[in-house]
Amino acid sequence: MQINITAAAIAKINERTAGRKGFLKLKYDTDGCGCAVNGVIALWFVPALDQDDLAIETNDRPVYVEKAKTVFLDEEMKIDFSQTTNCFQLKSPQQILNGHMSLIIKEKTD
């Protein structure tokens, strides 16, 4: 699996995560979607990784994905940022996986 992060997305990720330590993760979010196969891919910044997270090397930093959820992702993807919609986008040559992603910053909870 390959992920490329555009310069616009890198700049916006750095801006929004400045001063925080954590990991960038593509999360297959099923909250409120009904079942495990109905979900949407979201961009999360998390303070810690889960045991089943896989690192995908990119042109900027590793992006982590849940091993069991890789079936919902394409082999070649790009994380971009649209100034027009003020949203991140996850695209592949075949499709737009999520054209309106927010960067969700998860805080550490004890």
Image (spheres, rainbow, N blue to C red):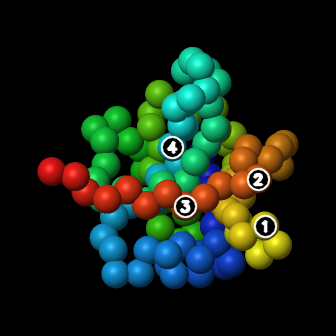
Distance, label 4 to label 2, CA atoms, is: 15 Å
Viewer-side label of 4, 1: 1
Residue 103, can we see it?
Answer: yes
Q: Give the amino acid at mark 2.
A: Gly
Is disc 2 surrounded by few (<14), some (14 to 19) or many (20+) residues within 10 Å?
some
> Which residue in the protein does label 2 denote?
99
Label count reads 4
Q: Is residue 5 above or below residue 49?
A: below
Res. 83 image quadrant: bottom right
Labels 2 & 1 near each other (Cβ < 8 A): yes
Q: Give the amino acid at mark 1.
A: Thr
Viewer-side label of 4, 3: 3
Q: Give the amino acid at mark 3.
A: Leu
- Where does residue 91 sit, x and y in percent of width and height? 75, 52
From this viewpoint, which residue is outermost toward the top? 35
* Image side of residue 74 versus residue 108, left or right: right
Residue 63, can we see it?
Answer: no
Residue at 55%, 21% (x, y): give it: 36
Distance, label 4 to label 3, CA atoms, is: 11 Å
